[in-house]
């Protein structure tokens, strides 16, 4: 069956990827981002933080690279979701957007847009500088909504020693930034352990939702005390 408790409908066999050295897909990254968002809602609900899925930056880059995209951004219905995010951040309803972005269809990076402090933070486990497409799209979007140019900073992130750990390391960098008292940057030699922990967290979420769905289908009756 499908993994329950997350927005994307993917089958449970995808859970096995966490236990391998395979590259983590959008679906895996979004499961992890969902868990991070739930933690934000529990621990930092009043701090104006929104965690967006991996498609946020993809939509924004596609918009910016579309010849007509910037001209139609203010009115086109298909850009309403991006506009709404920009508007609530610009006026201070929310203060920070947190996400993971993909580069070249083969690498994950951590990204934080901090509207309160007029900066964006970039974390690349390969040690790379800010991707040009991401920087140009972000600069345009931020200026459209605020009229400002944000500073660029780099966030602490573990440097990977293989070709498959970028996804879990990008997530960990965000977790450390948001919850420094709970998380710490991991040693690159124990990435497999972190993937196992994530497998267990996603599985727990699935099992909880499966139990609730099953329980909801039954009408529990109890014998009379007589």
Image: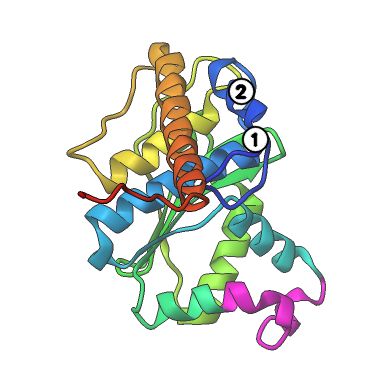
Residue farthest along the top direction in this orientation: 189
Tell me the element at label 2.
helix
How many numbered tags mark residues here?
Answer: 2
Find the residue positioned furthest to the front: 226
Which residue is under mark 1? Answer: 25
Pointers 1 and 2 in contact (C-beta within 8 Å): yes
Residue 213 pos. (x, y %) = 51, 48
Mark-to-mark CA distance, 1 and 2: 9 Å
Element assignment for label 1: loop
Q: Name the residue furthest left.
A: 181
Tell whether position 74 is magenta.
yes
Which residue is denoted by mark 2 in the rendering? 17
User: Which of the two discs, 1 and 2, sits closer to the camera?
Assistant: 2
**Measured along the vertical axis of the image, is residue 171 above or below residue 218?**
above
Residue 42 falls in image quadrant = bottom left
In the image, farthest residue toward the right: 67
Compared across the picture, whether 83 is left or right of 208 comes to right
Please determine whether, in this image, residue 97 is positioned above or below residue 82.
above
Left/right placement of residue 57 relative to residue 94 reads right
**Residues in magenta?**
67-83
């Amino acid at each position: 069956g499908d993994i329950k408790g997350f927005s994307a409908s993917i089958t449970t066999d995808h859970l096995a990827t966490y236990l391998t050295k395979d590259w983590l897909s959008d679906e895996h990254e979004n499961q992890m981002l969902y868990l991070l968002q739930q933690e934000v809602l529990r621990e930092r609900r009043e701090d104006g933080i929104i965690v967006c899925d991996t498609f946020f930056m993809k939509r924004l880059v596609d918009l910016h690279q579309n010849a007509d995209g910037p001209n139609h951004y203010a009115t086109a219905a298909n850009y309403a979701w991006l506009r709404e995010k920009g508007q609530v951040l610009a006026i201070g309803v929310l203060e920070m957007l947190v996400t993971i972005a993909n580069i070249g269809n083969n690498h994950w990076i951590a990204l934080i847009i901090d509207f309160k402090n007029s900066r964006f933070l970039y974390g690349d486990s390969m040690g790379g500088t800010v991707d040009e497409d991401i920087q140009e799209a972000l600069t345009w979007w931020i200026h459209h909504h605020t009229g400002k140019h944000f500073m660029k900073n780099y966030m602490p992130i573990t440097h990977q020693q293989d070709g498959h750990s970028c996804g879990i390391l990008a997530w960990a960098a965000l977790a450390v930034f948001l919850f420094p008292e709970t998380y710490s940057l991991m040693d690159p030699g124990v990435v497999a352990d972190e993937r196992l922990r994530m497998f267990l967290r996603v599985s727990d979420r699935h099992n909880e939702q499966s139990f609730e769905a099953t329980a909801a289908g039954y009408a529990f009756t109890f014998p009379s005390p007589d």
